Image (cartoon, rainbow, N blue to C red):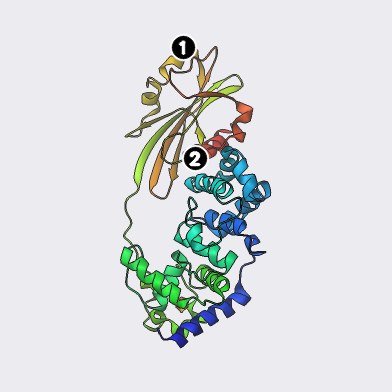
Amino acid sequence: MNSESAISIISTTLQEWYSTHRRDLPWRTNSDPYRIWLSEIILQQTRVEQGLPYFERITHRFPDVHTLANAPIDELLKLWQGLGYYSRARNLYAAAQQVVRDFGGRFPDSYDTLLQLKGVGEYTAAAIASIAYGEAKAVVDGNVFRVISRLYALDTPTYTTEGKKQFTTLAQQLLDPSHPSEHNQALMDFGAMQCTPASPRCSDCPLQAHCLAYASDTVSQYPVRRSATPKRERFFHYLMIVNGNNTYIQQREHKDIWQHLWEFPLLEADHEMSTEEWLQDPLLAPFAQQTLRMETPVKLRHILSHQIIHALFVTLHVSGTVELPPESSWRTLSLSDLSGVAVSRLTEKFLVKSEHN
Ligand code: SF4
C-alpha cells in the first residue's frame, strides 16, 4: 500500500475522478488567492451549499483585499450574519489589513508566509499555497482524515498530536508534487462526494481495490472519533424596550460568542429565569412606572457547536424619557434601523418571530 506505485495510482485515480466529478464552484474560475482564501475561511465549519451565497455577497461587496481592508468591520459582520463562528469574520478582516499593511497589498505567496495571516492555519495555508501558487503542500482537513483513515485502515485518532502528524505525513506522501492543486481539490471533493461520512459510495468507488477498510468490511469504524463532550448550557434573558420608534441595543465586547455583534440589553443567569423573576431584576425595575404593555415573552433555544443557549426575550412598550442605566453601553436605535445592524442568528430568529424585523 505504501509502495510508490500504489501511491501514484491512488493520486492518478483521484485526479481522473476529479476531472469528471469536480464541483463547479465560483472560486475555481481562476487561481486568485484572495477568492480562494475567502472561500476556505467561509467553508470552515460550513457546508458548500450554505457558504455559496455568502461567498457571492462578500466578493460582490469586497471584490479585492483592499476594499475589504478599508471597509468598516460592521459591514463584513452584517454580510456574515447567519453564518456563525464570527471569529472567522473578525480574523478575515484583520488578515485583510495585514495583507495591505505588511505585504504591500499583495497576497503572501508561500505556505510559510501565509501562516502569518490571522486566522490562517495549516490547512488554509496549504490550500491557498497549492491551489493559487502550485506549492506542493498537502491539505489535511476532516475530508482528508476520513479518506486516508479508510484507505489505510488507520486506528490512530485524528484529534491527537500523534494522529495529526501521522495523517499529515501520509497526506504529503500521497500528494502528486507536479499537480498539487488538482490533487488537493480532488481529495477534498472525493471526501465530500464519494467517501462521505455516512453511507460512503463504496460500490462504485474507483479506489475500492486500494481501500483496506473496504477490504476488511470495517469502513464504518473509520475515522476513529472522539467521544462527544457535553455542551455548556447558558441562560440569556433579553430585554427589548420599545419607546415610540426607538429601541436600545448594546455591542458584545467581551471575548465570547458573537463578539462585536449587537443585541438587546442582556442578563445572563446560571439558571432559566421565569418571566416574573426576570421582570423583578434591577435592570428592568426602572421601567416599571413607564411600561404601557408587555408583549408575550418569546422563549428560544439556540444550539451552537459547544453551547446551548436558552433565551427569554421580553418586550416592553414604554412611554416618556428613558433614563439609560448609568455606565451601560446601551445605544438608542430607531426600530427601522434594526435590520441594518449585525446581530446573532438567535436575535435574528427572535426579530422574525416577533415581527420586529
Ligand atoms: S471504498 Fe469506500 S471507504 Fe474506501 S475510499 Fe472508496 S468510498 Fe471510501
- Residue visible at 52% across and 77% down in the picture: 176
- The answer to whether residue 222 is left or right of residue 317 is left
Disc 2: which residue: 346
On the question of residue 28 being in view, the answer is yes
How many numbered circles does the render carry?
2
In contact (CB < 8 Å): disc 2 and disc 1: no
**x then y, percent, for residue 204:** 53, 81
Q: CA distance from mark 2 to mark 1?
A: 29 Å
Which is more toward the observer, 159 or 136? 136
**x then y, percent, for residue 226:** 33, 61
- Residue visible at 63% across and 76% down in the picture: 20
Q: Residues within 10 Å of mark 2 (few under 14, many from 20)?
A: some
Give the label, 2 or 1, closer to the camera. 2
**x then y, percent, for residue 190:** 52, 72
| Rendered view: 9 above or below 122 | below
The numbered mark, 2 or 1, whose residue comes first in the sequence reads 1
| Rendered view: 276 above or below 287 | below
Work out which quarter of the rendered image holds the C terminus and state it.
top right
Which is more toward the observer, 130 or 228? 130
Disc 1: which residue: 289
| Rendered view: 124 above or below 309 | below
- The answer to whether residue 326 is left or right of residue 77 is left
- The answer to whether residue 338 is left or right of residue 269 is right
